[in-house]
Image: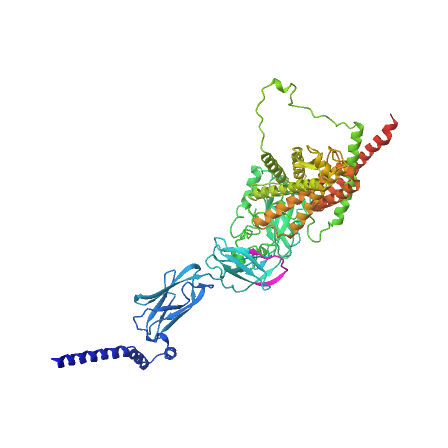
């Protein structure tokens, strides 16, 4: 009985050993068969490479493939990468695409490792990579990685040339850092559409390679790889003012089909402005430009041309010239019938291939687009890339980014302007001798003639002539002082904005905001600086007084600028003043400590009032100079931010210096009268400096007066006024007393 059991045990052991031998020999048999069959050279090299012993050589066909690189949860800083791993020999695997569709790659060979090169992965915090065996989806491996590729650099805002701005594309909401070869950087946040742009400051002209990298919320602290360098030509020099040759000064032109010609910088785009109207634009070809358009209402306008070069730099405006636009008369029926036959065949497509109606430039030379530069410029989203000769076309088509007249650079036009600062100083001395001093003589003459009494008492048109107790007292409504100040400020800003033509464009809402900001800063300086001086230096108590009559001055200055088409405008921006009171308090101790030798209720002296007025004028003048200096460092007004900054800066300059000049007039109870009573030398110096800065700011208007011959008439009128004032003063001072 024991022998059969022993035989069966030996049989089971033999069968088990035979099965193990077959299992170990199974992977070798297919390999041997493959070596006997003829294979291509590439396959032979692959087989030879797999002969080396590898750790995964013992994988069976039923083993799942593995992804070894990249690792799970790894960050990848490029959209192109290599994915590799291990598999069983002769196992065909597929690397599936995270976005679905066709696999990223398919590998099926006798090797026990696999690799997929140059695989594209989209950006994202969780990009799933899955490898499966063909026909056996259960045999798979899967990892998740974070991917953020390098952003792209497209060039400048409008093409391959740039005025310091660089644009490109990136991952939405990522922070892009653009870098120059000297390691200068600028940063920008990618918007929801995938676009970004940033500005390099302090550059000089020249070509430089620009690279960019980006960082997102899911990649921090890591950032993407740097993009390939893109060569950009930086041109940060603004072009000179273009020249307008036609129409001439004082010309009368029709409101439709007016032709404008001139010269400028080749490749730049010249825009013609008639008042607030942007009538047409053209590209400068061979140093000259020409465009024709209408859309201007009948009337007299100041025509100015501005050019923007290929890099995006906007230069100063040309010298304004007055042009009259006349409405065309309606033709009679007989005339219209006579002219109809020849006009009928004109609008055929073959005869008019482009909307350019200019006749000064031959048809074949008219460029089909604003720039002949291919590449990124063709797909630039810049709204100014419209047909240059389009009838009624405008480089600023009524958007929030449109510049207004307040955004134009103030001061002398161009680097070679014939209006130097020395001439501004000479004009200031002339204004002092022919306007300011004669006004003081006239005011003194009238005051002495009337014995110090005012010229005329102001009648009470709606005052009470009966005592208050006879009536029921109505409740008094007192408005909050901040509400009153805000209303006055808004009214003043509206008057200032209306000092120039206003059209129904969104940009003028931005202009209103800029004017409000500018007036707030001007009034803050005109109030806070004198208050500090009054309390810390003079040791007196100062109070702020709101003066409603100043609103009348603001309105009068704005109306005068609008009526006489003064650009830049002559503005007045103050809403109140600072007055001083006695130094005594309830106990008189404070006054005794500060000034023990003076009485308890000492009133401010003439010298103290003059010093406070001089500080006020000096603060306004300094603010104007500071704002003018900072404004010259800003880029051209081409975006919402740059236009708002330019309009705010110009408002500060014009309102501050205009206010300083007007309150320096030595009549009545103005600051100028108090300064003159304290120190004639200080008043003279402040007046010359203030008038000099004002004439420098109004340089374009002075140039226009000189070109039109109006300047000589103004000099004659000023000299006549000075002679009359001096004659009245001499008569009252020397002749009238001898006749008594």
x, y (%) of residue 620? 69, 43
Please tell me which residue lies in front, 123 or 707: 123
116 sits left or right of 184 in the view:
left
> The N terminus appears in which quarter of the rendering?
bottom left
Return the residue found at the far left.
Answer: 1
Q: How is the image coloured?
A: rainbow
578 sits left or right of 169 in the view:
right
Q: Which residues are magenta?
A: 198-209
Return the residue found at the far top.
Answer: 470
Q: Residue at x 77, y 46 (%)?
A: 426
470 sits left or right of 540 in the view:
left
x, y (%) of residue 498? 62, 39
Q: Residue at x 30, y 73 (%)?
A: 60
Return the residue found at the far right.
Answer: 738
Q: Is residue 202 magenta?
A: yes
Say whether residue 157 is visible: no
Q: Note whether 46 is above or below 144 in the view shown.
A: below
x, y (%) of residue 421? 74, 49
> The C terminus appears in which quarter of the rendering?
top right
x, y (%) of residue 251? 67, 43
How many labels, in total? 0
Q: Note whether 162 is above or below 132 in the view shown.
A: above
Please tell me which residue lies in front, 679 or 50: 679
Say whether residue 725 is visible: yes
């Amino acid at each position: 009985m024991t022998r059969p059991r022993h035989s069966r045990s030996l049989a089971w052991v033999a069968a088990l050993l035979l099965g193990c031998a077959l299992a170990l020999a199974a992977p070798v048999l297919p390999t041997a068969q493959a070596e006997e069959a003829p294979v291509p050279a590439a396959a032979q090299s692959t087989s030879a490479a797999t002969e080396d012993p590898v750790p995964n050589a013992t994988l069976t066909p039923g083993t799942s493939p593995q992804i070894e690189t990249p690792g799970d949860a790894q960050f990848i800083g490029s959209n192109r990468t290599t994915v590799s791993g291990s598999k069983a020999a002769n196992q065909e695997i597929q690397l599936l695409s995270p976005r679905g569709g066709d696999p990223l790659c398919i590998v099926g060979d006798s090797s026990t490792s696999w690799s997929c090169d140059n695989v594209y992965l989209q950006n994202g915090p969780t990009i799933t990579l899955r490898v499966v065996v063909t026909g056996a989806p259960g045999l798979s491996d899967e990892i998740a990685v974070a991917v953020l590729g390098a952003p792209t650099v497209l060039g400048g805002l409008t093409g391959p040339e740039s005025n310091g701005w660089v644009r490109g594309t990136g991952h939405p909401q990522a922070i892009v850092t653009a870098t120059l070869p000297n390691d200068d950087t600028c940063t920008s946040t990618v918007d929801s559409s995938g676009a970004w742009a940033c500005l390099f400051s302090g550059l000089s002209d020249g070509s430089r390679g620009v690279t960019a990298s980006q960082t997102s919320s899911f990649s921090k602290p890591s950032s993407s790889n740097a993009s390939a360098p893109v060569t950009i030509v930086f041109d940060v020099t603004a072009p000179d003012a273009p020249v307008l040759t036609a129409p001439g000064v004082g010309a009368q032109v029709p409101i439709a089909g007016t032709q404008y010609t001139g010269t400028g910088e080749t490749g730049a785009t010249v825009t013609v402005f008639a008042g607030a109207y942007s009538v047409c634009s053209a590209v400068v070809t061979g140093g000259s430009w020409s465009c024709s358009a209408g859309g201007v209402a009948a009337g007299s306008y100041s025509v100015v041309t501005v050019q923007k070069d290929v890099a995006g730099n906007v230069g100063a405006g040309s010298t304004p010239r007055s042009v009259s636009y006349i409405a065309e008369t309606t033709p009679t029926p007989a005339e219209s019938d006579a002219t109809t036959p020849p006009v009928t065949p004109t609008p055929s497509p073959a005869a008019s291939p482009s909307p350019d109606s200019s006749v000064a430039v031959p048809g074949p030379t008219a460029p089909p687009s604003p720039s002949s530069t291919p590449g990124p410029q063709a797909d630039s989203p810049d709204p100014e890339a419209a047909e240059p000769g389009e009838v009624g076309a405008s480089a600023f088509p009524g958007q929030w980014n449109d510049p207004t007249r307040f955004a134009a650079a103030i001061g002398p036009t161009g680097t070679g302007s014939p209006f130097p600062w020395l001439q501004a100083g000479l004009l200031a001395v002339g204004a002092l001798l022919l306007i300011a001093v004669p006004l003081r003589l006239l005011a003194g003459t009238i005051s002495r003639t009337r014995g110090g009494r005012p010229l005329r008492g102001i009648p009470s048109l709606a005052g009470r002539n009966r005592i208050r107790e006879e009536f029921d007292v109505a409740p008094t409504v007192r408005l909050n002082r901040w509400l009153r100040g805000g209303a006055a400020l808004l009214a003043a800003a509206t008057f200032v904005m209306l000092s120039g033509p206003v059209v129904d464009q969104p940009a003028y809402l931005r202009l209103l905001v800029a004017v409000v900001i500018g007036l707030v800063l001007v009034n803050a300086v005109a109030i806070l600086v004198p208050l500090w001086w009054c309390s810390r230096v003079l040791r007196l108590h100062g109070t702020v007084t709101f003066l409603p009559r100043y609103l009348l001055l603001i309105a009068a200055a704005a109306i005068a600028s609008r009526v006489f088409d003064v650009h830049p405008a002559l503005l007045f921006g103050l809403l109140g003043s600072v007055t001083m009171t006695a130094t005594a308090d309830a106990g008189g101790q404070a006054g005794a400590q500060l000034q023990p030798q003076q009485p308890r209720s000492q009133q401010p002296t003439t010298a103290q009032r003059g010093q406070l007025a001089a500080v006020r004028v000096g603060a306004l003048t300094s603010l104007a100079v500071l704002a003018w200096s900072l404004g010259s460092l800003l880029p051209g007004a081409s975006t919402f931010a740059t236009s708002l900054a330019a309009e705010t800066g110009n408002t500060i300059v014009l309102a501050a210096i205009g206010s300083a000049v007007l309150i320096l007039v030595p009549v009545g109870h103005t600051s100028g009268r108090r300064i003159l009573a304290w120190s004639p030398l200080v008043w003279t110096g402040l007046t010359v400096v203030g008038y000099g800065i004002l004439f420098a700011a109004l340089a374009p208007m002075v140039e226009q007066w000189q070109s039109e011959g109006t300047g000589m008439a103004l000099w004659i009128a000023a000299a006549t006024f000075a002679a009359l004032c001096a004659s009245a003063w001499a008569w009252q001072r020397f002749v009238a007393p001898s006749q008594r």
